[in-house]
Amino acid sequence: MLQNKVGRLGRAGLLITLLMPTAQLDAAQAEPPLTLSATAPDHYTVQAGDTVWDIASLFLPDPWRWQELWAGNEHLDDAHAIEPGDVLSVVWDEGRPTLRVTERSDVTLSPSLRRGPLDAAIPAIPQAQIAPFLRQHRVVESAALAQTPFVVATDANRLLSSVGDTLYSRGIGVSTGTYHLVRQVAALIDPLTEEDLGMFVTDIGRASVNSVLSSEGLSALMVTQARQEVRLGDHLLPVEEVMAQAAYHPQAPAVLIENAQMIAVASGMTQIGALDIVAINRGARESVREGDVLMIQQRPPPAEDLLTTQSLALPDRQAGVLMVFAVFDRASFGLVLEASRPLAVGDALRSP
């Protein structure tokens, strides 16, 4: 069991309101009875910056079941909101725990904190962790990426280009238009089957076509934005804005997720910790959804039986929690919500 602290993920200072999809609540009825953590308090006063995950982790050993904890709040309708200063209390209904608002303090809300309905889609985690990443990273089918135009030459034969420089590419075929400049970060390969899951790419800037095709079939483009210097071989993709969801609601996967692993880390670091973003080898094909929570498992090194000197395979141990926030066909991106020990590429993932 992971021990989570309230406020750890509340860096964005967001007011918490909660969404309770009916379909998810119906599905949850098939799960074991909802139980509280041994350390769950009887009362909790909502703080500015709390998140859904924070509050659920305080009360539940299975925080992805937070919707069930809020079931039965008929007295809270669309005109109400959970605000800083509200006191949450555990009440029991036929042996089932439920959180209720039992007191509302008079507090002055800052301009960034607004009242909202209980069922409004408010982020369960700081949006600042996800939105910038989605604007700059994606997974593209390897075969599709290979067919896209790429930089074949630069003005004055520069090896590196930046804003204002001219690039040349084949295969664009239009005299106007704006393109993403993207660079391959890593080929995503399933470690179990060696299947190609797509190419992890990063957006390094934008370029606009500023000439008609030359006799050699080249299009000239001017670099209009650059997060990194542009190199020969960088690919050009039509501009398509990728927006993060307004809210991510942690939930148990709809299907059993097996043989999943973390296969790449966005930062390039060897060790992975809380709030790091990783790629995993499961996607829409395996019915993975945005908001799905997966447990991170590690296999300890074998131990030696001191009596027989035989090697003993130890059971996997829980090492963290991950929430999926972007799903592609055969791969997904996830945010590590909790890590009780250093994590690494290759660590296993499973349904809670």
Image (spheres, rainbow, N blue to C red):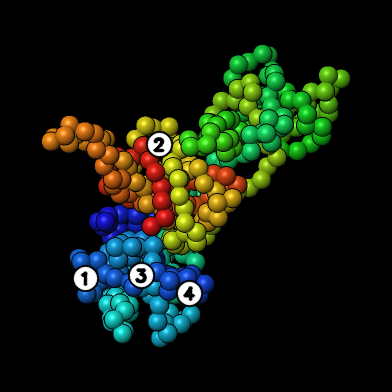
Dot 2 amino acid type? Val
Mark 1 or mark 3: whose residue is earlier in sequence: 3
Is residue 8 or residue 281 the one in the foreground? 281
Measured along the vertical axis of the image, is residue 41 above or below residue 133?
below
Question: Residue 196: in sight, yes or no?
Answer: yes
- Of badges 2 and 1, the one in the foreground is 2
Q: Classify the position of the N terminus by image quarter.
A: bottom left
**Residue beneath the point at 60% across and 16% down:** 159
Question: Mark 2 and mark 3: span between their CA atoms?
Answer: 32 Å
Query: Between disc 4 and disc 3, whose residue precedes?
Result: 4
Tell me the crowding category of disc 3: few under 14, some 14 to 19, or many 20 or more residues within 10 angstroms, Cα based: few
Q: How many other residues sit within 10 Å of disc 4, few (<14), some (14-19) or many (≥20)?
A: few
Q: Which residue is at the far left?
A: 307
- CA distance for labels 1 and 3: 22 Å
Badge 1 marks a residue whose secondary structure is loop
| Residue 32, label in figure | 3
Q: Which residue is more in the foreground, 136 or 12?
A: 136
User: On the image, numbered disc 2 is attached to which residue?
Assistant: 345
How dense is the environment of label 1, judged by Cα within 10 Å: few (below 14), some, or many (20 and up)? few
In 3D space, how far apart are the residues under numbered discs 2 and 1 (Cα atoms)?
36 Å
Q: Secondary structure at mark 2?
A: loop
Label of residue 26 in the image: 4
Residue 225: image x %, image y %? 61, 34
Between 237 and 204, the one nearer to me in the picture: 237
Which mark is nearer the camera, 1 or 3? 3
